[in-house]
Image (spheres, rainbow, N blue to C red):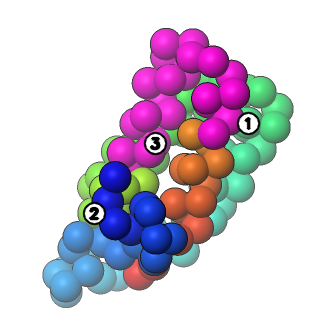
Amino acid sequence: MSKQNVNGEPIHSLFADDPEMHELISYFVQELPDRARTVAELWRERNLEDLQRMAHQLKGACGGYGFTPVGVAAERLEDSLKSEADIDAIGEQVTQLIDLCRRVAA
């Protein structure tokens, strides 16, 4: 796990210094709280199929915008959902993913 995951520090994009990505990253960061709320809602409803789909989308988007720790957490959640892992473990991964999403900064 990266230092950012352990210390609870803000997570910045790997592309933060790229002027061509600045506007796109800012928009993505603004939309991420809504995505985190959707993840939480899907989990509360135990809508595991849509939760898996959302994790897949977050994995790709976070990777594409340079937020690797969030993408890795989303991939871990997606894999657990695909393999029908223990529901408690999935719950912990949901919590970790939401926490990471909240720490993303432009």
- The residue lying at 62 percent from left, 30 percent from top is 90
Residue 25 visible somewhere in the drawing: no
Helix, strand or loop at mark 2: loop
Q: Tell me the crowding category of disc 3: few under 14, some 14 to 19, or many 20 or more residues within 10 angstroms, Cα based.
A: many
Image height of 28 relative to 35, above or below: below
Marks 1 & 2, CB-CB < 8 Å contact: no
- Marks 1 and 3, the one that precedes in the sequence: 1
Q: Mark 3 sits on what residue?
A: 74
Q: Tell me the crowding category of disc 1: few under 14, some 14 to 19, or many 20 or more residues within 10 angstroms, Cα based.
A: some
CA gap, disc 1 and disc 2: 25 Å
Q: Quadrant of the C terminus?
A: bottom left
Helix, strand or loop at mark 3: helix
**Residue segment shown in magenta:** 71-92
Helix, strand or loop at mark 1: helix
Q: Mark 1 sits on what residue?
A: 43
Q: Position of residue 96 (x, y in %)?
A: 57, 50
| Residue type of the residue flagged with mark 2 | Gly
| Residue type of the residue flagged with mark 3 | Ala
- Marks 2 and 3, the one that precedes in the sequence: 2
